[in-house]
Amino acid sequence: MPKSLIAHLQNRLQCESGKWRLKMSSRDWVYEKFRTYYGSSNYAFQSPPSLSQREFAFLLFKERAMVRHKAFTNSTAIRSYMRERTPSDVYHSCAYYENPEADMDKKGWIGADLVFDIDADHIPTSCGKIHDEWKCGNPDCLVTGGLTGRGITPEECPACGGVKFETKTWACDQCLETTRNETRKLLDMLMNDLGFSEHEIHTYFSGHRGYHIHVENDAVKSLDTMGRREIVDYVCGIGLDIFDKKKSAPTKSKQKATTIFTLGNFGWKGRLKNGIRKYVKNATKDDLIKAGLSKRIAEIILKNKESIVNRYIDEERWGIIKGIGFETWMRIAEHVKDQEISQIDTVVTSDIHRLIRANGTLHGKTGLLKVEFPVRELDNFDPFAGAVAFKEGTIRVSVSDAPEFKLSGETFGPFKNKKVELPTAAAVLLILKNRAEVVD
Ligand SMILES: [Zn+2]
Ligand SMILES: [Zn+2]
């Protein structure tokens, strides 16, 4: 027998009570946890509306293969399927179809929920630079061993243009706070600008590091891709006319700002008005300079903060203070607009066939659940407590590295090359994040 094979077998076998048996790899251990979770008599699949019109998709844990175009008549049937196949991730279409099992072009699209995905994967955060790493997966990358970097994974490798990456990410309180803030702005627009009521909007923690918002309402159901893009544009402030077209761009150099700038109390105009007021009230000199204003203008603004807020913004008497004209307001308004938009994943919302993670199912990258909570609970809902699935048992693991983290109210780490006994949920999270191994 070749030496390498003997070494391999020794690595995979362990002697227990005089009998040799296969060692359980860490992933197998997590697989068992997922299998037991879905197999438990306490587990009930949480159906989306019109379940039988949805396409279901499963990423199978063992096979690591995606199975799509599945349809079920009721939640018991899905549960049996999940029990049998043990998926690491479960998805359903945001769309409703006549034949959800058919090929894409024969499904017979009836309509779709309006869905939004807000994920730290797409939003620059200062913590991402600390805890997220990527490495180009192209074996022929121009950088030997593959270019590496920190923060958001690029769409293409800057060195070779490759599109495959190995990533090592983490979900921390700051990621959650950032995505929660973007979700808050989105919910405000959906309810106050677009007029959806609280009971038509469903808010979920995604199971990883962000939030999903589903709008289920007859008015949005029939929207085509273009219609959904209009909503995306609104939420992202794309194509927004900050200044009234007719009055914009002063023709004479002496023309006063009075005639070019109107704000209102509704929609984006109201958002800008409140945003500019808040911004001028709180901005420091550095903030103003960062927003693209000159040192001189920044000083004028700081000196006249109060009259700017009272006269300019509240009374709309533009052009009162010398030196602050069209250009300055344009810069401030653009800067405030960038802060007021919600950083949604635009592709998800415009896709009328999109698959979205099913509520109450485990996330294959964390072992946490996608969970729904009431819209008004956004600020109070703690995913690191409310989305924990595995609540029993502990296991000894060897952790390569992990920042400090909290689960179910308990704080763990930071760990660096350490063997430690952890509750199941914490061990599952670290193993799925490639940061720990079960100690045999
Ligand atoms: Zn590369
Ligand atoms: Zn973070």
Image (tube, helix red, strand yellow):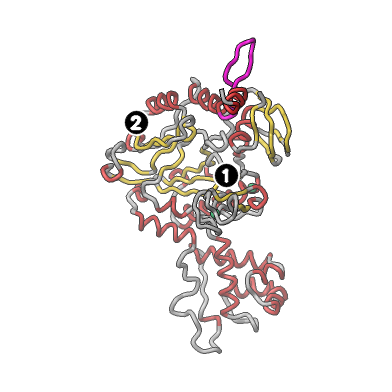
To which quarter of the image does residue 2 belong? top right
Q: Quadrant of residue 300?
A: bottom right
- The correct choice, above or below, for 186 with respect to 317 in the image is above
Above or below, comparing residue 145 to residue 20 in the picture: below
Location of residue 336 in the rendering, given as x and y in whole percent from the top left corner: 58, 66
Viewer-proximal residue among 317 and 219:
219
Question: Horizontally, is 172 left or right of 214 in the view?
Answer: right
29 vs 219: above or below: above
Q: Which mark is residue 72?
A: 2
Kindly identify the residue that appears in the image at 47 percent across and 57 percent down. Answer: 193
Quarter of the image that includes the C terminus: top right
Q: Which residue is mark 1?
A: 209
For the point 61% across and 42% down, which residue is it? 380
Q: Which residues are magenta?
A: 13-27
Specify the quadrant of the image occupied by residue 358.
top left
Q: Kindly indicate whether the residue at mark 1 contacts the one at mark 2 (C-beta within 8 angstroms).
A: no
Give the residue displayed 27% in from the left and 43% down from the top: 108
Specify the amino acid type for callout 1: Arg
Of pointers 2 and 1, the one earlier in the residue sequence: 2
Does any atom of ligand 2 lie closer than 8 Å to the CB of label 2? no
Mark 2: few/some/many CA within 10 Å (<14, 14-19, 20+): some
**Element type at mark 1:** loop
Residue in the foreground of this view, choosing between 334 and 398: 398
